[in-house]
Amino acid sequence: MSLVELIAQADERGLAVSGLACLDRCVPLLGGDDEVLRPLWTSLAEGAAADDWAQRLEQTRGTLDAAAGGGDEAAALAHRMLAAAPAQRSAAGLREWADACSVAALRIHRLLDGTAAADGTDLDAARREGRTEGVSPLLAAELRRQVTVLELLSAHGPAGLRGAREVATEGRRVLRAAMSRRSRRDG
């Protein structure tokens, strides 16, 4: 199933996790540490109060705004992901956010991959068709991570939250490595 189809079929929790996982993988661009999004992950656990998300989101925004430095286009995309996160966990708002985060995370990975910056990859087609052939390895891996997160939540419900967080953590390490390569390349 394609990424677009998975987002269209995801429930409220799956959408929140999808958007949050994309944001989590991009945290290095926001100047945050590895644990800065932990409160938001916790608020998605089964049994968490509905207003818990909004409170923790506001705290996280404050923390990351304080940590933020300058930035380039990739950092700006990551900041927009955070700014666009809906305070209310409604399916409609979360679906729009998850979709926007998906596109932004893919664009960020394409920007960070020096060989793919001008590859002409149609991100919408890749998301819609679920194809990774012809795209850079960094971009293909991000696409697969996004699909994996949604599949974990679809198959396991709240129990898939831990696996989704592990996928986000792995992706964050990959993004850091890509940032480091770009920094060395750009001098």
Image (cartoon, rainbow, N blue to C red):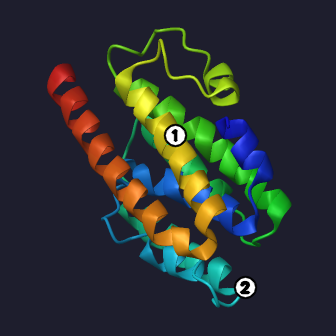
| Residue at disc 1, secondary structure | helix
- Could you say whether the residue bearing mark 2 is in a helix, strand or loop? loop
Q: Amino acid at mark 2?
A: Ala
Position of residue 118 measured from the top left corner of the image (x, y, whole percent): 46, 9
Query: Pointer 1: what residue?
Result: 105
Instruction: Name which residue lies at 51% across and 81% down.
Output: 42
Asked if the residue under mark 1 is in contact with the one under mark 2, i.e. CB atoms within 8 Å, the reply is no
Above or below, comparing residue 111 to residue 63 in the picture: above
Local packing at callout 1 (Cα closer than 10 Å; few below 14, some 14-19, many 20+) is: many
Within the image, what quadrant is residue 112 found in? top left
CA separation in Å, label 2 and label 1:
26 Å
Q: Is residue 24 left or right of residue 176?
A: right
Percent x, y of residue 5:
75, 40
Report if residue 145 is visible in the image: yes
Q: Nearer the viewer, residue 117 or 133?
A: 133
- At 18% from the left and 21% from the top, the residue drawn is 185
Q: Amino acid at mark 1?
A: Ala
In this view of the protein, can residue 58 be seen by the observer?
no
Quadrant of the drawing holding the N terminus? top right
Q: Which residue is mark 2?
A: 50
Q: Quadrant of the C terminus?
A: top left
Residue under the point 77% across and 72% down: 88
User: Going by the image, does 11 lie left or right of 161?
Assistant: right
How packed mark 2 is, by other alpha carbons closer than 10 Å (few <14, some 14-19, many 20 or more), is few
Q: Is residue 122 above or below residue 179?
A: above
Residue 55 x, y percent position in the rendering: 62, 83
Image location (x, y in percent) of residue 156: 59, 68
Task: Determine the image quadrant of residue 87.
Answer: bottom right
Q: Which residue corresponds to the image point at 61% horizontal and 36% vertical from the top-left? A: 103
